[in-house]
Amino acid sequence: MAMQRSVHKIKSWSLAPRPELGFAANRLKGPVSKKPEALESFVLATAASFALVRRFSSKPMRASSTDLPKNITVYYGNMAFWRAECVRMCLFLGGVPFEDCRDVKREQLRQEGKLTFGATPVMEVDGRILSQTQAMATYCSKLAGMHPSDPWEAAKVEEAINGCTDVTMTVGKTFGLPDDEKLSARAALITAEGRLTMHLKGLEAIAAEQGDSVVADSITVADLAIWRLCGWLSSGVIDGIPKDYVSTFQALSALCAKVGDHPKVQEWKAMHPELYK
Ligand SMILES: N[C@@H](CCC(=O)N[C@@H](CS)C(=O)NCC(=O)O)C(=O)O
C-alpha cells in the first residue's frame, strides 16, 4: 500500500553556548590544562556541545527517506488490537510506506519461518523478520520520527508499552477460564485493589505526569498503544469488564480523547470503518 510521505522541516539550531548549561563545568573531572583561558575554552566548548545535544534531543528525528527500508510488511489479523495497531499506525502517522498484511494465516507464517517466537504480530523488513511488540514499536517509532531522542522520554515510552503488556497478560489469563469462573475473576481484577486496576493506575500515573500524554507535546507510539488498549477494554467485548471502567481513569481518558482527535488517527479510522464503528 503506497502511503504519502509527509515532509518534515528541520528547524535550524545554532551552536551558541547557553549560559544555563553552566552545570557542565561542575561535572568536569579535571581541567585539560592548568591555564585559566584553556580551561575556559574547554568549558565553553563542552557547554556548546551540551547545548547542541539538548536542542537536538528535544526534536524527534525521522529517518531520511534514503534510510528507510525498501519494503516493510506488517503481519497481523484484521483486528485493531493494540499490539499490531500501534505499529501500523506509527508507520502511517510518520508517512512510512508499508504493506499492511492482514490475510495471511498464522500457519502459513509459521511454515514460512516468520514466527520467531510463535506469536504475531511480526514484521518483515527487507527480507528480515522482527517480532515482539516492544521492539517493533520502538523500531517503527524511530523510522517514523516519533521516538523521543531524549533518553528519559524514550524510556517512558517503553515503560508505557510494557504497562500495556502487563494489562494484556492479566486479562489474557482469564480467557482460558471456564465461563462460571471467568466473570468472577474479572470482577476481582477491576476492584479498587484488583490487578487490572493496579496496572491501569500505572499507565494513569505516566499519562498524568503530562496530563494527557506519555511525553509532553507530542504523540508517541505509546500513546497509540494506550489508546488502542483502552479501546479494547472499553469495547464491551471482554465480558465482565464494563465499558465505563476505563473512564474512571482521568488522564487515560484525556489521552484517549487527544489521540482520537488527531487528524491522522481520524484518517486511519476512516480507512478501516469495519474496525472503528
Ligand atoms: N511477546 C509477544 C506476544 C505476542 C502475542 O501474545 N501475540 C498473540 C496475539 S495478540 C499470539 O500470537 N498468541 C498466540 C501464541 O502466543 O501462541 C509480543 O510482545 O509481541
Image (cartoon, rainbow, N blue to C red):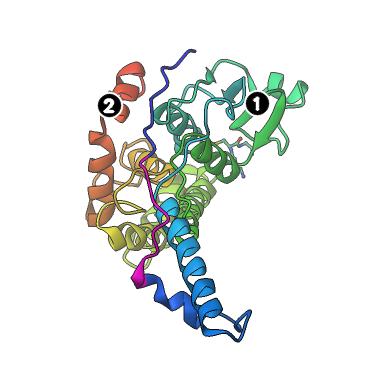
Q: Residue at x 46, y 43 (%)?
A: 179
Q: Earlier in the sequence, mark 2 or mark 1?
A: 1
The answer to whether residue 227 is above or below residue 194 is above
Question: 45 and 37: which one is in front?
Answer: 37
* Residue 232 drawn at (x, y percent): 37, 38
- Give the Cα distance between marks 2 and 1: 26 Å
Amino acid found under the numbered disc labelled 2 = Gln
Can residue 249 be seen here? no
Q: Is residue 13 magenta?
A: yes
* Residue 97 drawn at (x, y percent): 50, 20
Pick the quarter of the image with the C terminus.
top left
Horizontal side of 11 relative to 84 (left or right) equals: left
Considering every residue shown, the one lying at the far top of the view is 1
Q: Residue at x 48, y 83 (%)?
A: 26
Amino acid found under the numbered disc labelled 1 = Glu
* Residue 218 drawn at (x, y percent): 33, 46
Tell me the tag on residue 266: 2
Disc 2, SS = helix
Disc 1, SS = strand
Q: Residue at x 39, y 51 (%)?
A: 14
The answer to whether residue 78 is above or below residue 147 is above
Magenta extent = 11-20
Q: Which residue is mark 1?
A: 124
Label 1 CB-ligand 1 distance < 8 A = no
